[in-house]
Image: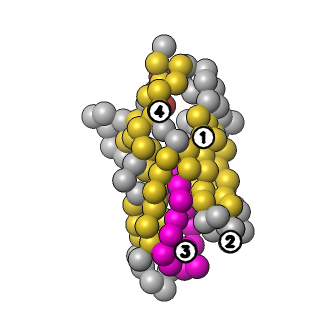
């Protein structure tokens, strides 16, 4: 199994910055990639950003390109999401998601961390 713990959420004014962290433990050596999703009130959960565990390949939702940066620290088994120029519409619960290598067909979610952007 893989355990994921998010941290770093909070209340920030529009235009401000936050840094979210996802700390992974357990079978981290079997992780294929890690993604951040978010879910705003009344909306479906949506993809935000992703990174491969080994090679560092990244992907972003169009709505966050240029403002959010995903990175990983394999030594610490941590994936971070640097969030700049935050907008009101970035308010959501942010979830960390890890997918194991295809042969295992398993994935895991963290408990989520709240990000609230105020005007």
On the image, the x and y values in percent for residue 51 come to 62, 59
Please tell me whether mark 4 sits on a helix, a strand or a loop: strand
CB contact under 8 Å: marks 3 and 4: no
Q: Earlier in the sequence, mark 1 or mark 3?
A: 1
Q: CA distance from mark 1 to mark 2?
A: 22 Å
Identify the secondary structure beneath mark 2. Answer: loop
Binning the other alpha carbons within 10 Å of mark 4 as few (below 14), some (14 to 19) or many (20 upward) gives some
Q: Which residue is the site of mark 3? A: 28
Q: Is residue 46 visible from the viewing direction of this image?
A: no
Q: Main secondary structure of the magenta part?
A: strand
Task: State the image coordinates of residue 24 (x, y, percent, origin top left).
Answer: 52, 65
> Where does label 1 land, which residue?
19
Which numbered marker is on residue 5?
Answer: none
In the rendered image, which residue does mark 4 sit on? 10
Q: Quadrant of residue 34?
A: bottom right
Tell me: 67 left or right of 89.
right
**Residue shown at 53% from the left, 19% from the top:** 13
Which marked residue is nearer to the observer: mark 2 or mark 3? 3
Labels 1 & 3 near each other (Cβ < 8 A): no
Task: Measure how far apart labels 1 and 4 are at the Cα level.
Answer: 10 Å
Query: Which quadrant: the N terminus?
Result: bottom left
Q: CA distance from mark 3 to mark 4?
A: 27 Å
Region in magenta:
22-37
Please give the residue where the numbered disc 2 appears in the rendered image: 54
Q: Measured from the top left, where is residue 82 in percent x and y?
A: 64, 41
| Nearest to N terminus: mark 3 or mark 4 | 4
Which residue ends up furthest to the left in the rendered image?
42
Secondary structure type for disc 3: helix
Q: Height in image: 78 above or below 94? A: below
Q: Mark 2 to mark 3: distance in Å?
A: 11 Å
């Amino acid at each position: 199994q893989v355990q994921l713990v998010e941290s770093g959420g909070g209340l920030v004014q529009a235009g401000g910055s936050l840094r979210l962290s996802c700390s992974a433990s357990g079978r981290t050596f079997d992780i294929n990639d890690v993604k951040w999703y978010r879910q705003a009130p009344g909306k479906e959960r949506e993809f935000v950003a992703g990174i491969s565990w080994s090679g560092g390949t990244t992907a972003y939702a169009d709505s966050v390109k240029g403002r959010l940066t995903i990175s990983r620290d394999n030594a610490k088994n941590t994936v971070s999401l640097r969030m700049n120029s935050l907008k009101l519409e970035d308010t959501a619960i942010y979830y960390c998601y890890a997918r194991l290598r295809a042969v295992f067909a398993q994935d895991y979610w963290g408990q989520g961390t709240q990000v609230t952007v105020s005007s």
